[in-house]
Image: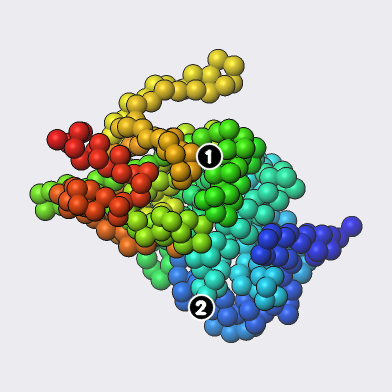
């Protein structure tokens, strides 16, 4: 029996979005979206559309799903406006090896609002639960930090560089390879991943279950013109955390369930700054022991921190890191004004205006500046 288009692309809903089948009447949006040079800038296999007829040619095969067995693609509709704002789906679906490649695009007016991660969470769940995938792959252009940050936020692991992977306009381009495995996704959703809307709600939840929140922090260093500089960013979460918004901080965030702390640092730094961690100090860790499929390892951080009163009951692990030579890009809705600050200037702020620094990071930076580095 030939599958109906709504059976092949079932409706998937999130808090703000609907993922639905694309139809021929969506040609105007597809022409606008895939004809825009900003949207298609990093696409490896698509030139911007020149005519509406090209959009119709793209949509036509989707109307007969049985002719595209390795391809599943949805439109992303925003509930509040009732219109399409992007697309997402899977290609290169290999049923024998239970893997597929995920792809997505979003109209620029809706960037920076967390909509694409929200859509992809539904799509990933469908892939693992309904398509029986074991591995979801993704590739991005090396310069597409926004896309890499989305993947990191969703738990994808960076696997490596695909050198000169595709040719566009007679130029060979590198791609970064990412993947997410079913067992990693299951471990993630099995844990406590809810993020209540405010600091007070988070604190109340943790107090109810009598737990501290585990976090990682990264002191990111570089050498510049003969001096050591530290990456400092402005914390900016006025809706969720108005008390501390506007203070200075270092990149930090929660550790996902069963997430390796080194991978957590890499993910958090990428999410908040768009930078890729290339080394740790110290980098002292044992091999992973798993006598009963219960993986464990030991490691040595630079230092630890703990919130004893007020704020959120956090216990943190801190590393010193070096990153690739790239320009930082602050995460919208969380971070503003990323700068490289000399240790002498940071020390001056700590001495004269300590209230400018996020309280949780005050003892960390004090230890770093005064005790570790003399």
Q: Residue at x 63, y 53 (%)?
A: 121
Query: Which quadrant of the figure has residue 339?
Result: bottom left
- Residue 256, x across and y down, in percent: 53, 39
Going from N to C along the chain, the mark reached first, 1 or 2, is: 2
Q: Residue furthest top?
A: 291
Q: In which quadrant of the rendered view does residue 32 lie?
A: bottom right
Label 1, residues with CA under 10 Å away: few <14, some 14-19, many ≥20: some
| Residue 333 in the figure: left or right of residue 1 | left
Picture residue at 37% right of the left edge, 43% below the top: 360
Residue 342 visible in rendering = no
* 363 versus 45 height, above or below: above
Q: Secondary structure at mark 1?
A: loop
Q: Position of residue 223 (x, y in %)?
A: 17, 48
How many marks overall?
Answer: 2
- As helix, strand or loop, the secondary structure at mark 2 comes to loop
Residue shown at 52% from the left, 51% from the top: 199
Front-most of residues 284 and 143:
284
Q: CA distance from mark 1 to mark 2?
A: 36 Å
Query: Which labelled disc corresponds to residue 346?
Result: none
* Closer to the camera in the image, 64 or 296: 296
Q: In this rendering, does residue 243 appear at all?
A: yes
Residue 36: mark: 2
Q: Quadrant of the N terminus?
A: bottom right
* Residue under label 1: 256
Residue farthest along the left direction in this orientation: 226
Q: Is residue 337 left or right of residue 347?
A: right
Q: Residue at x 53, y 23 (%)?
A: 295
Left or right of 61: which side holds 164?
left
Which percent across, then down, holds residue 180? 56, 44
Residue 161 spot, x, y in % from top left: 40, 48
């Amino acid at each position: 029996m030939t599958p109906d288009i709504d059976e092949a692309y079932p409706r998937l809903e999130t808090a703000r979005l609907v993922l639905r089948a694309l139809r021929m009447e969506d040609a105007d949006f597809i022409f606008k979206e895939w004809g825009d040079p900003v949207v298609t800038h990093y696409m490896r296999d698509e030139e911007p559309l020149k005519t509406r007829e090209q959009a119709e040619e793209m949509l036509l095969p989707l109307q007969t799903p049985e002719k595209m067995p390795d391809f599943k693609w949805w439109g992303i509709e925003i509930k509040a406006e009732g219109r399409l704002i992007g697309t997402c789906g899977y290609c290169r679906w290999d049923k024998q090896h239970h893997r597929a490649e995920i792809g997505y695009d979003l109209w620029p007016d809706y960037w920076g609002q967390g909509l694409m991660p929200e859509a992809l969470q539904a799509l990933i769940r469908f892939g693992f639960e309904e398509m029986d995938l074991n591995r979801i792959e993704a590739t991005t252009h090396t310069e597409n930090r926004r896309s890499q940050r989305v993947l990191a936020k969703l738990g994808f692991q960076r696997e490596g560089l695909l050198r000169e992977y595709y040719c566009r306009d007679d130029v060979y381009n590198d791609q970064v390879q990412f993947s997410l495995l079913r067992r990693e996704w299951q471990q993630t959703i099995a844990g406590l991943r809810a993020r209540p809307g405010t600091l007070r709600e988070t604190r109340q939840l943790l107090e109810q279950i009598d737990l501290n929140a585990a976090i990682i922090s990264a002191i990111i260093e570089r050498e510049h013109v003969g001096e050591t500089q530290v990456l400092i960013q402005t914390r900016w979460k006025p809706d969720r955390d108005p008390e501390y918004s506007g203070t200075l901080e270092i990149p930090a965030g929660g550790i996902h369930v069963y997430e390796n702390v080194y991978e957590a640092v890499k993910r958090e730094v990428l999410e908040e700054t768009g930078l890729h961690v290339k080394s740790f100090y110290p980098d002292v860790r044992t091999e992973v022991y798993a006598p009963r499929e219960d993986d464990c390892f030991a490691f040595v951080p630079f230092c630890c921190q703990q919130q004893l009163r007020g704020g959120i009951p956090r216990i943190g692990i801190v590393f010193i890191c070096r990153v690739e030579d790239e320009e930082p890009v602050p995460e919208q809705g969380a971070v503003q004004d990323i700068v490289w600050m000399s240790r002498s200037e940071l020390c001056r702020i700590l001495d004269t205006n300590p209230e400018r620094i996020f309280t949780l990071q005050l003892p960390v930076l004090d230890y770093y500046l005064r005790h570790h580095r003399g």
